[in-house]
Image (cartoon, rainbow, N blue to C red):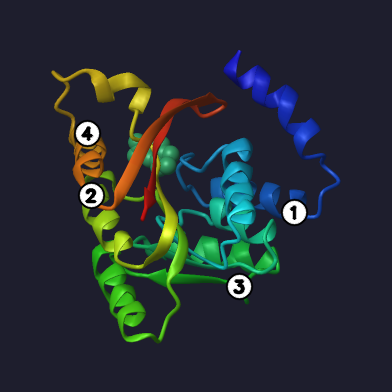
Amino acid sequence: RWTAVDAYTFPHSHPASRPNTKALENTLTASKAAGLSNYSLSPAQGKFLALHCRASGVTHALEVGTLGGYSAIWVASENPQLRLTTVEYNRKHVEVARKNIELAGLSDRIEVIHGAGIDVLAHLRNEVKVGTRPMFGFVFIDADKVNNWKYFMLAKDMVKPNSVICVDNVVREGQLADLRDTDPYVMASRQVVENAGKEPGVDSVVIQTVGEKSYDGWLWAVVS
Ligand code: DHB
Ligand code: MG
């Protein structure tokens, strides 16, 4: 039913005639052909992040974990004034994403940085600190899950007041709440949920999601 509801609702919310439909479909096809994993957002999730950025007037967004560029293309294509910086460790993913972004006509507004998330975010944080890079208005963390809390804290230092930091895949089909489960990804999800709840200047909530990407959820945090 989750998949059926996405299949029913999405074409009504976002008819296939929209300008970004082809680019998004091409991105998924090319990513699959290149052997990338199927961990991109669902169309509905991609559009949700894009609409959030529009409603909040985000002009500079940051993503950790580009994969094939699907979420990046959603957010940028729905927001003509927005610039997105996206960080990816895997060289092959970087190549596939850059090609997808170029074909989508978004190379001028999406910057793909190749490197380890911690190193790149530390570098970006320094640029923001010295004023050579504007602060971000939205951050999407969707990379190697064990570093979620480190990414969160680095991101927290580079956002404007009242910005959202979203961390993908924290619910993990409910494994989050099974405290006997010591899977490293689950432990990292618990860490980011528990620490965000205690962190001064951060107010957070976990939203469970179902749909064509099964059952998961994200942490949604506002940094004051
Ligand atoms: C995984 C990673 C993702 O980013 C995702 O959306 C789903 C699953 C994973 O590594 O298990
Ligand atoms: Mg994810």
Local crowd at mark 1 within 10 Å, few (<14), some, or many (≥20)?
some
| Ligand 2 under 8 Å from disc 3 Cβ | no
**Earlier residue among tags 3 and 4:** 3
- In which quadrant of the rendered image does the N terminus lie? top right
- In which quadrant of the rendered image does the C terminus lie? bottom left
Q: Quadrant of residue 16?
A: top right
**Earlier residue among tags 3 and 2:** 3
Name the secondary structure under disc 2: helix
Residue with the mark numbered 3: 109
Circles 3 and 2, Cβ within 8 Å, touching? The answer is no
Q: Which residue is rendered at x = 21% and y = 48% of the image? A: 199
Q: Nearer the viewer, mark 3 or mark 4?
A: 4
Q: Kindly identify the amino acid type of the residue bearing the numbered disc 3.
A: Arg
Q: Kindly identify the amino acid type of the residue bearing the numbered disc 2.
A: Trp
Residue with the mark numbered 4: 190
Is residue 125 rendered to the left or right of residue 52?
left
| Separation (CA) of disc 3 from disc 4 | 34 Å
| Separation (CA) of disc 3 from disc 2 | 27 Å
Answer above or below: position of 7 versus 110: above
Residue with the mark numbered 2: 149
Instruction: Report the number of numbered marks.
Output: 4
| Separation (CA) of disc 4 from disc 1 | 35 Å
Circles 2 and 1, Cβ within 8 Å, touching? The answer is no
Q: Which residue is rendered at x = 16% and y = 20% of the image? A: 179
Name the secondary structure under disc 4: helix
Local crowd at mark 4 within 10 Å, few (<14), some, or many (≥20)?
many
Residue found at the far top of this picture: 1
Answer above or below: position of 42 versus 160: above
